[in-house]
């Protein structure tokens, strides 16, 4: 993009250098208009001329305020809304370029229906430093990945037996899925079609919760106030205590 453009023509992100240049050009234009006022004509207009000068002065003040607001807004977006900390413009452009390259790959895997490969690709070590949450089907992939992690953990338990780590991890994972994805659905939404795809996963996790861990729906209702924060999130430390207490009943 041209460094003098006030914002990116592709994503609309504000370019502080270009915005400032645009403001200065407008300011010069106002000054030139003031300089070109015919003094003799102005004298003939009398009070009307004074009104014009006042209007132009007010306009100049408004332009200055708008320009300052424009710059402040640009910095606010970068530091707050975009939540990029000290990320530079180059970093943001690199992230956008990475997304343009990888998100279509995720789309193809998603459309193929190979969701096991999808979560393996989306949640790899390579993607941990990128904003994958901006991908259209991220919420679905995250929920499917929760199911995969629980299923893999059960397979390890069946081959290695129970230990405290497995008990704590699977208790939290099942409680999180039960309350935030299944019952309250407070976690990020997915489409109706994706909800249908996830139904067998929910059935599997409910079966683990009821048959392997021994918690009925009545038990879960009684535990709700003990493990949920005031913001509606499952608290890991509370799940740990419950897991240690009840691990002897896990199958």
Image (cartoon, helix red, strand yellow):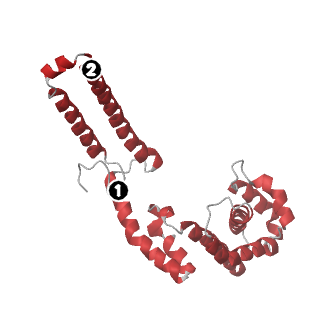
The C terminus: image quadrant: bottom right
Q: Secondary structure at mark 2?
A: helix
Compared to 215, does 63 lie above or below? above
Q: Residue at x 46, y 45 (%)?
A: 80
User: Which of the 4 quarters of the picture holds residue 92?
Assistant: bottom left
> Left or right of 172: which side holds 225?
right
Residue at the extreme right = 218
Q: Residue at x 42, y 46 (%)?
A: 77
Q: Picture coordinates of residue 149 (x, y %)?
A: 63, 72
The residue wearing badge 1 is: 91
Mark positioned earlier in the residue sequence (2 or 1): 2
Compared to 129, does 146 lie above or below? below
The residue wearing badge 2 is: 48
Compared to 207, does 82 lie above or below? above
Of residues 119 and 25, the one nearer the viewer is 25
- Residue 209 in sight here: yes
């Amino acid at each position: 993009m041209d460094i003098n453009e006030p914002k990116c023509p592709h994503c609309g992100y504000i370019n502080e250098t270009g915005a400032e240049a645009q403001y200065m050009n407008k300011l010069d234009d106002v000054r030139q208009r003031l300089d070109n006022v015919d003094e003799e004509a102005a004298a003939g207009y009398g009070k009307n001329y004074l009104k014009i000068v006042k209007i132009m002065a007010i306009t100049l003040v408004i332009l200055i305020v708008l320009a300052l607001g424009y710059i402040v807004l640009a910095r606010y977006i970068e530091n707050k809304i975009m939540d990029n900390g000290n990320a530079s413009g180059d970093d943001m452009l690199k992230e956008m370029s990475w997304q343009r390259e990888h998100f279509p790959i995720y789309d193809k895997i998603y459309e193929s229906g190979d969701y096991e490969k999808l979560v393996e690709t989306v949640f790899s070590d390579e993607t941990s430093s990128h904003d994958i949450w901006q991908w259209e089907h991220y919420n679905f992939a995250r929920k499917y990945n929760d199911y995969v992690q629980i299923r893999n953990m059960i397979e390890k338990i069946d081959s290695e037996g129970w230990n405290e780590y497995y008990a704590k991890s699977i208790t939290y994972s099942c409680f999180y899925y039960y309350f935030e994805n299944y019952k309250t659905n407070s976690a990020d939404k997915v489409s109706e079609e994706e909800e249908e795809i996830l139904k067998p996963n929910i059935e599997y996790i409910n079966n683990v919760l009821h048959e392997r861990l021994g918690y009925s729906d009545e038990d879960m209702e009684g535990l709700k106030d003990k493990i949920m924060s005031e913001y509606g999130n499952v608290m890991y430390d509370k799940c740990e205590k419950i897991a240690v207490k009840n691990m002897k009943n896990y199958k």
